[in-house]
Amino acid sequence: MRVLLATTAFLFASVGAALAEKWDMPLAYPETNFHTENAKAFAACIKEGTKGAIEIVTHANGSLFKGGEIKRAVQTGQAPIGERLLSAHENENALFGFDAVPFLATSYEQSDKLERAARPYLEKLLDKQNLVLLYTVPWPPQGIYTKKPLKTGADMKGVKFRSYNAATARLAELLGAQPVQIEAAELAQALATGVVESFISSGSTGYDIKVWEHLRYWYDTQAWLPRNSVFVNKAAWNGLKPEQQEVFKKCAQEAQARGTAKSKELANWYIEQLRAKGMVVEPASPELAADLKRVGEVMTQDWLARAGEDGKAIIEAYRKL
Ligand code: PCA
């Protein structure tokens, strides 16, 4: 019996060494989206760096957990790692919305600076929620998709508008539109059935969902560059060996640089694709720009009031960079 036990233990030990630990990684956006492709490259980096000990398995398009459920799933350990648009969780803490304050950071360079300023605060906040922040990557600048020409803010009155976070819902309200929160994975369906007829997003998401099948205009308002963030459950993180944690940190740094470069590189390409499919792509008219600026100021003041001292400190640090 003793011999048998010893043999079994040995077998387990050798099988254990050969078997990779599988980490499911829920993602909210489509398989071919650049964030998803970046996450797959990150997974490959982890596999290589840990010599196959940890294998991250990506699940795109909300297939494992829907976008709105991903953060909670990682907090509670139902998934060890995940990617989420954190500004959709501004209801938990205003700081999560730092990257969706209108016209605060409208270029990639500004977006990077804002992220550097916000990062320590974001890390601290996530740490309190049982999460370890790994990397964040911006979406291309946000513009407004519509069915009909949009000349002034008043043209948005009564329009059924898809929102993806509190800021986009607030923007719609202030313009007199009717916001409905819908994940990107359900957006094409919502447009097809007429649940919504307008939304604000990047050329990337418009391209992903073949927006030209439903809408004709995109106004390049350059409102902000929201970010997707990748984070790990703290217990899963603490279960990693120190050298594995170093691999994660290195791969995360590379993923942030690679994803940001890709976003920048593709931003204009997406817009060209929208045009090639027959869409009208224009900058905001001076009237629309002025209306959006006014709304943006209201939203900025409101965010500053809710984000308190930390929010102010982020903006101050950002201005100094
Ligand atoms: N695409 C995502 C968020 C921002 C973007 O460009 C979406 O529309 O859901």
Image: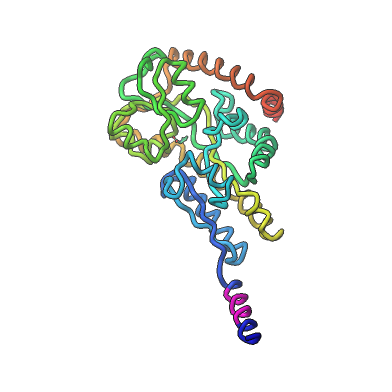
Magenta-drawn stretch contains 13:
yes
- Tally the numbered discs: 0
Percent of width and height locating residue 103: 55, 23
Q: Is residue 75 left or right of residue 223?
A: right
Q: Within the image, what quadrant is residue 209 found in?
A: top left
Q: Is residue 139 left or right of residue 75?
A: left
Q: In the rendered view, how is the structure colored? A: rainbow
Residue beneath the point at 47% across and 48% down: 36
Query: Compared with residue 247, is residue 51 higher up or lower down, i.e. above or below?
Result: below
**In the current view of this chain or complex, which residue is farthest to the front?**
1
In the image, 107 versus 299, the foreground residue is 299
Q: Main secondary structure of the magenta part?
A: helix
Q: Is residue 70 visible?
A: yes
Residue range highlighted in magenta: 8-15
Split into 4 quadrants, where in the image is the C terminus?
top right
Magenta-drawn stretch contains 185:
no
Residue beneath the point at 43% across and 12% down: 287
In the image, 299 versus 7, the foreground residue is 7
Percent of width and height locating residue 111: 59, 33
Percent of width and height locating residue 151: 37, 15
